[in-house]
Amino acid sequence: MGVFGIKIYDDDMALDVKEEYLEKLKKGIDNEKALKEIIEENKDYIEDIDEGPVFWIALADTMWNEGRLTEKVKKEAINAIDKNLIKWKDEVDEKEYKLREKELLKFKDKINKEMPKMKIHAETKKKLTKKDENKKYQWNIGDVYAYKLDNEKAKELNLNGKYLIFRKIEEGLDNGRGIAIITYVQITNNEQLPKSKKDLEELPYIVISNWGNVRHEYRIELVNISQKFIKDELIYLGNYLEIKLPKDEHIVSNKINIPWYKINQIDLLLHDYKILGTNKKPVYYEVDPRDIEDSKIRFLMRVRYYEEKLEIKPPNDAIVKDDPLLYIALVDSMMIGGIVLNPVGPLTDEMKQEAYKRIEILKNIIKEREDKTKEEKLKILDKLKNKIENFDSKDNFYFNF
């Protein structure tokens, strides 16, 4: 976000907050709902030490001008003044700081005065009808749009006539022209559009990233979306805030790490579909754990390996130190080597002894059940035990690049 002056709205963030809030009022959204939505849509910015204070100051000023300022927002804004001034003191000279301080003290005095009469926007005089819903051409959280596939790439993959389904869950970070959103991408199984929440929940999600076949991501940032594109190319299906999500989803903690696509790059999404598949039919590929930098992913890869080879699945709420399969997977992942981004500490003799105990527990589970391949499974565990016994810590510095 850019700052280009000392006044409240000499700031991209402040301008965005003002425009977003007023836009909601113009669409006939009542004040309580508009406030709830704008806070939800900007929660990442609110939590930011620099952007959060700007958000509350701009929102309070806009709401006061509209005759709609609440006590909660007023309190947040007053608390934000000192926080914002700390940032200014660190980043500008004394003269600019004093001008900003004067501006914010003026703002504080203003919002403590009696508000003007509540403004009624022309758009609020009539409620939007269901027929009008498709004419809004804007994208709210929960809005679902369909895009019909009809190009060479779709034809190549036998997808022509099917639909990509985009459901917005957050505002995007892009500051350029047009709309930017965080969205899931689903794909229809045929040429029929989903007509209900149940229909949507049954559609597969396109896998966007799949590190080591174990960390699945499904969210993208869609950028450069124009109102014209929404109007001419997309089909509005309704608003659905609570939709069942893939159970194996990994959600990145920072939006900046979510892969982004321009709206005219639909073919790239089809490429993801081709090489990675969907949550219902994922495409897995050969991956050497030594080529994976993230040690947590290496651990998850070994968990999957032993689950499949031993046909033993830990309980959903299991923790590593208490579950035999998870424990041996951790020890095995520690012996792989490569770059470790999340160090788990050295493989000590104590850990080795604990691993042997868990191997025996798993052996007993296998021996006690009816299983024609139990000998093969026991050999896998014997091989692991032998590997642990012969492990030298210097092997941790092995690289396979």
Image: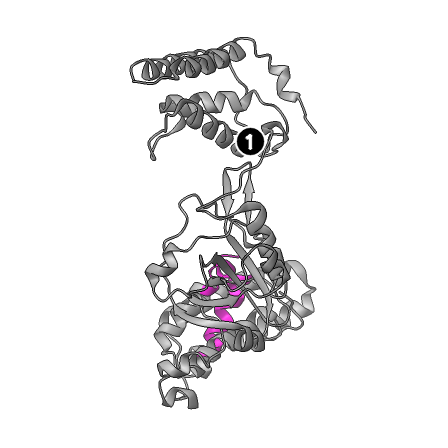
User: Can you see residue 289?
Assistant: yes
Q: Is residue 400 above or below residue 221?
A: above
Quadrant of the rendering where the C terminus is positioned: top right
In the image, residue 54 sits, relative to residue 276, either above or below, namely below
Task: Locate residue 246 relative to residue 288 in the image: left or right.
Answer: left
Q: Is residue 370 magenta?
A: no
Please tell me whether mark 1 sits on a helix, a strand or a loop.
Answer: helix
Q: Nearer the viewer, residue 165 or 3?
A: 165
Q: Residue at x 52, y 37 (%)?
A: 213
The residue depicted at 55 percent of the width and 77 percent of the height is: 232
Q: Which residues are magenta?
A: 41-63
User: Residue 220, position in %: x, y?
Assistant: 54, 56
Kind of residue indicated by mark 1: Ser
Does 51 lie within the magenta span?
Answer: yes
* Residue 399 % position (x, y): 68, 25
> Which residue is the site of mark 1?
295
Q: Position of residue 253 (x, y in %)?
A: 51, 48
